[in-house]
Amino acid sequence: GTLAVAGVAAGVGYSAGQWIMEKVHEKEATKRGPRSSQGSSIENLPYDVQISLKQWMMYMGAHAGGCQVTHQRLAELFAEFEQQQPQHAAAVRSVQDPGIMQALQDAAGVRVAA
């Protein structure tokens, strides 16, 4: 009973995460245009960093998806994420590419107010 429900939930979470990552990759490809071999991409990052980015994106989506937030609120969300998942947060911090971070926000449905 409970194990089957947990297994289904894990499978759904994994599928949703994969779908979100595909959307991020599509958005990156659109922004890069024909020079797809140049520039940074999530696919070029180590796998553990990709997983951490996926965790952050899912956290953002769960807490602010479909919303417009201030930079302050986004910083607060990251601080909460950092307390709950410090290893993932450290890996996310290591990514210094604004394009990747914007793609994550877009895929999570989070708009940051200017």
Image: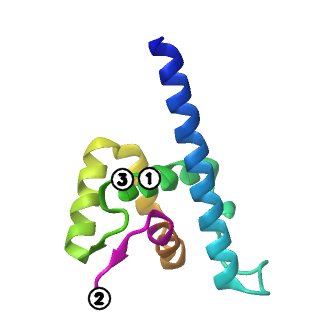
| Residues in magenta, as a range | 105-114
Mark with earlier residue (3, 2): 3
Amino acid at circle 1: Met
**For the residues bearing labels 3 and 1, Cβ distance under 8 angstroms:** yes
User: Is 9 displayed left or right of 87 in the figure?
Assistant: right
Residue 106 or residue 12, whichever sits in front: 12
Q: Is residue 18 above or below residue 6?
A: below
Secondary structure category for the residue under label 3: helix
Residue 83 image point, x, y percent: 25, 46
The verdict on residue 113 being magenta is: yes
Closer mark to the observer between disc 3 and disc 2 = 3
Amino acid at circle 2: Ala
User: Is 2 displayed left or right of 49 in the figure?
Assistant: left
Residue 83 or residue 112, whichever sits in front: 112
* Residue 87 visible somewhere in the drawing: yes
Numbered circle sitting on residue 14: none
Residue 72 or residue 10, whichever sits in front: 10
What residue did someone put label 3 on?
A: 62
Residue 35 image point, x, y percent: 78, 86
User: Is 5 displayed left or right of 61 in the figure?
Assistant: right
Amino acid at circle 3: Ala
Find residue 30 and report its image quarter. Answer: bottom right
Secondary structure category for the residue under label 1: helix
Find residue 110 and report its image quarter. Answer: bottom left
At x 68%, y 63%, the residue is 44
What residue did someone put label 1 on?
A: 58
Find the residue positioned furthest to the front.
1
Mark with earlier residue (2, 1): 1
What residue did someone put label 2 on?
A: 114
